[in-house]
Amino acid sequence: MAMNIYRLTGDMCHQIAIILLIVQLCRSRNARGISIKTQELRLLVFSTRYLDLFTTYYSLYNSVAKVYYLVATTAIIIMCKTDPIKSVYNADHDYCPHWKLAVLPCSLLALVTHIVGSGISSFDVLEFLWTFSIYLESIAILPQLLVLRRYRLVENLTGKIMLLLGLYRFFYILNWIYRAHHELMYQHSPVVYICGTIQTLLYADFFYQYARATRFCGSSRDKARTNNYMSGALDDDDVMSEDEDDDGLVFEISRSSQQPADASQTKPLLNISTCEDGDSELRARSAGEAR
């Protein structure tokens, strides 16, 4: 597979997102807002897609990247399923029946696709598993999105991880377009195109809320800091201390439009007030979950 700037950028976004998730788990010692089921689906995707590690050598970078995805995702799952993270993991939020609603349908769809495309006589197990991994990856993020929707408060670092994962797939779409125009022997795959587009669109609502929250919160905090600094309420040390705390900022995912609410309970798409006091609410929730 030829390397280009779009594929390299997508890979970097993907790899950095995994590193940030591991850092978040190590630093916070809890899996608040993280879906273990999405990580299990991702591990299944990598395990079925990268079986060619044992049959075909493409490049050192390709092999190292595949091993990295397998090992890092396995490590994330182990961390989440062992103490101290396991003791504060809220399984009620991670409620998606992923084996029934993701793995089984994708297996059947991949089987039908492979039989229709190649026929029973030319059935190839590795090709079937690769097709299955493409289908499964397109919806593997769903449990994570459902967790964030149910938990509602999203930490800044978690938001960045989701942003990077979405950018990873977006840059891969650009990679396909680039290769289609510059590689004479490039083989088009409608399955890959459709699944990649679906995966990117699944991030659309989250992207919108994240961009709106970070832009609004960032400008609001900067104005507040400037006013407080000019009035003497903050000195240089206070400003530096607030900057160090920015990674703990949160924003709030809007409630489902199907959930009834009276006029007094109606909230905007994002509750921007959580930018300032979200940390305390988040800690209160975590304490309640730990009990």
Image: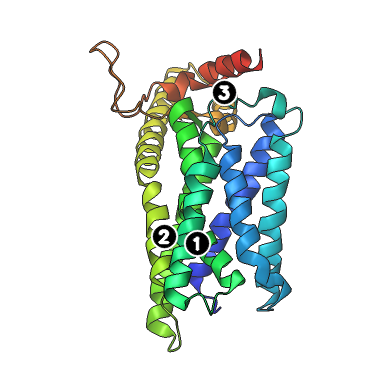
Q: Mark number for residue 238?
A: 3
**In-image side of 47 versus 197 (left or right):** right
Gap in angstroms between the C-alphas marked 1 and 2: 7 Å
Above-or-below relation of 11 to 256: below
Dots 1, 2 in contact, CB < 8 A: yes
Above-or-below relation of 77 to 7: above
Classed neighbour count for the residue bearing mark 1: other residues with Cα under 10 Å, few (<14), some (14–19), many (≥20): many
Gap in angstroms between the C-alphas marked 2 and 3: 48 Å
Q: Which residue is mark 2?
A: 195
| Badge 3 element | helix
Return the disc, 1 or 3, that comes first in the chain's sequence.
Answer: 1
Q: Which residue is mark 1?
A: 134
Q: Is residue 229 visible?
A: no
Tell me where residue 145 appears, x and y as whole percent. 46, 38
Tell me where residue 104 appears, x and y as whole percent. 51, 50
Q: Mark number for residue 46?
A: none
User: Which residue is pictured at 47% across the width and 76% down the height?
Assistant: 119
| Badge 1 element | helix
Q: Nearer the viewer, mark 2 or mark 3?
A: 2
User: Which residue is pictured at 58% across the width and 48% down the height?
Assistant: 41
Return the disc, 1 or 2, that comes first in the chain's sequence.
Answer: 1
